[in-house]
Amino acid sequence: MAVLPIVQLGHPILRSKARPVPLEKLKEKSFQQLIKAMVETLEKAEGLGLAAPQVNQSWRLFLAYPPSSPAVASSQPQVFINPEIEAQSEELVEDWEGCLSFNFLRGLVPRPRWVRMRAWNEKGEEFIVEAYDLWARVLQHEYDHLEGILYLDRMADLRSLMSLSEFEARMKKEKS
Ligand SMILES: [Zn+2]
């Protein structure tokens, strides 16, 4: 199993709508291998989520770590296939986001505070997740990748955009 290259900002697949995954596809060894390779890629990159278009695969598939289980060796990210947003809060909250496809930036992004999402897992079993705060943010960020939308498009004010080094310096300062 290999760590996959992560497609970077400017690649057209990041701006394309991803294809739905047919149920039969889940029985293919190559598709299950893709999921495993994405898990390894996400672990290596130390991100919170990774969508298939980010590894140059046009499928409605993403992985995300629930915030309660950080990216440690024992925990596995949750697999979302053909996700659908069933409901979202009207209330928006703003927080910082980054993206593995342009990991050198951070920006403040307003998003609905909670979301209810329906999806399949890697076995094709349907499940529903109700997510709040950071978990809701991660799910919406990854879902957007399947629609060709990047967090930059969701920012209310591009003036909050900053380099990773500047962001880290500021966070350090705010903590001290
Ligand atoms: Zn992203």
Image (cartoon, grey):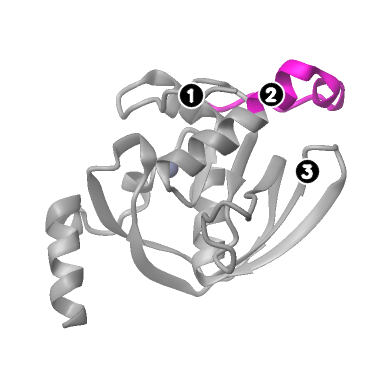
Is the residue marked by circle 1 packed among few (<14), some (14-19), or many (20+) residues within 10 Å? some
How far apart, in angstroms, are the residues tagged by discs 2 and 1?
Answer: 11 Å
Count of numbered circles on the image: 3
Mark 2, residue position: 33
**Image location of residue 87, percent across then percent down:** 68, 62
Q: Which mark is residue 121?
A: 3
- Secondary-structure class at tag 2: helix
Marked residue nearer the N-terminal end (2 or 1): 1
Q: Is residue 159 left or right of residue 134?
A: left
- Tell me which amino acid carries mark 3: Asn
Identify the residue shown where x is 50% and y is 40%. Answer: 42
Q: Is mark 2 within 8 Å of ligand 1?
A: no
Q: Nearer the viewer, residue 100 or 118?
A: 100
Identify the residue shown where x is 41% and y is 28%. Answer: 6
Q: Nearer the viewer, residue 176 or 10?
A: 176
**Image location of residue 174, percent across then percent down:** 17, 78
How far apart, in angstroms, are the residues tagged by discs 1 and 3?
Answer: 21 Å
- Secondary-structure class at tag 3: loop
Q: Is residue 29 left or right of residue 9?
A: right
**Image location of residue 16, percent across then percent down:** 49, 24
Is the residue marked by circle 2 packed among few (<14), some (14-19), or many (20+) residues within 10 Å? few
Mark 1, residue position: 4
Q: Quadrant of the N terminus?
A: top right
Q: Which residues are magenta?
A: 17-34
Q: Quadrant of the C terminus?
A: bottom left
Can residue 46 be seen here? Answer: yes
- Secondary-structure class at tag 1: loop
- Tell me which amino acid carries mark 2: Gln
